[in-house]
Amino acid sequence: MLMPILQVNSEDIPEYAIVCGDPKRAAGIAAQLDNPRELAFSREYRSFVGTRDGVEIAVVSHGVGSPGAAVCFEELIRAGVKTLIRVGTAGSYSADHPAGSLIVSTAAVRTDGLTRQLVPEGFPAVADSEIVEALYQAARQSEGIVQKGITVTLDVFFNGVEEFPHKKFKQAGALAVEMEISALYIIASLRGVRAGAIVALDGYADADLAAEYDPNTNVVADAVQREIQAAITAVVTLAKRQA
Ligand SMILES: O=P(O)(O)O[C@H]1O[C@H](CO)[C@@H](O)[C@H]1O
Ligand SMILES: O=c1cc[nH]c(=O)[nH]1
């Protein structure tokens, strides 16, 4: 069956998918698999399949922001995906986690508008614990800071007249902010599949720490490579465990 927005056929989509915002990053992830094949490039959604250690993996970009990403997650699940891992970037809340650190998201604060239209207030956006552990163990095999914890999903990247809610979420224990994980966890829960996420920190979101925002440094690029390796390793670990 052809998925109308991703423009991929369900027959080509395996059970495991790695998703990321940037279509270029999707190509970079696919290039690290064996026999990568591009399936489609429709809107912001660029789709590939490849294998690692005999495990078939889809790699698909979902663009920026929860509503667009939700379309991607929904169609992948309709096409047969049962395990989704997001490989993203995020802004740090703490000097303990500078740019280049990796955070495995255990749960996401739902400040986004999308999930409010899907589930009641107070319903938690939580990662699958087996995926969290697989990502954390895989990421710890590389150099650099790796931490597990709560992330915040926001709709806003450049602010308006309202203050960003970063301070209160930081005080409450959140580690970083990005723009799609709550949508991923809520949709996974609604559709009965499992999901997890790992993010590379690309600077400080907290105004007290923030310097000039530059996500295009070598430190961030290295961290993105480490999280890609961790996500691929985690998928293989999870798949072998299920076999
Ligand atoms: O690097 P990605 O996966 O796109 O993730 C983060 O980067 C984008 C903002 O620049 C948002 O999509 C945010 O969630
Ligand atoms: O949403 C995002 C992504 C990366 N860095 C940020 O500060 N915010």
Image (spheres, rainbow, N blue to C red):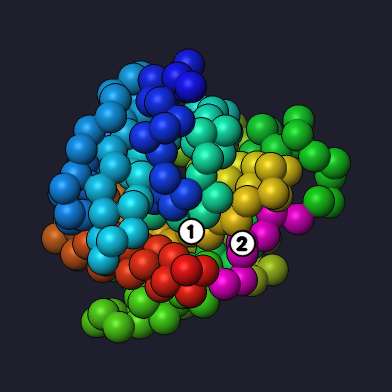
Q: Secondary structure at mark 1?
A: strand
- Residue 12: image x %, image y %? 37, 35
Query: What residue is shown with label 2?
Result: 127
In the picture, measured across the screen, residue 166 lies left or right of residue 120, that is: left
Q: Which residues are magenta?
A: 124-130
- Please tell me whether residue 129 belongs to the stretch shown in magenta: yes
Which quarter of the picture shows residue 66?
top right
- Residue 18: image x %, image y %? 39, 50
- Residue 195: image x %, image y %? 56, 55
**CA distance for labels 2 and 1:** 8 Å
Pointer 2 local density, CA inside 10 Å: few below 14, some 14–19, many at least 20: many
Which quarter of the picture shows residue 53?
bottom left
The residue at 75%/34% (across/down) is: 118
Q: Nearer the viewer, residue 230 or 158?
A: 230
Q: Secondary structure at mark 2?
A: loop
Query: What residue is shown with label 1?
Result: 197
Pointer 1 local density, CA inside 10 Å: few below 14, some 14–19, many at least 20: many
Q: Are marks 2 and 1 in contact (CB under 8 Å)?
A: yes
Taking 223 as reference, is 40 above or below it? above
In the picture, measured across the screen, residue 221 lies left or right of residue 206, that is: left
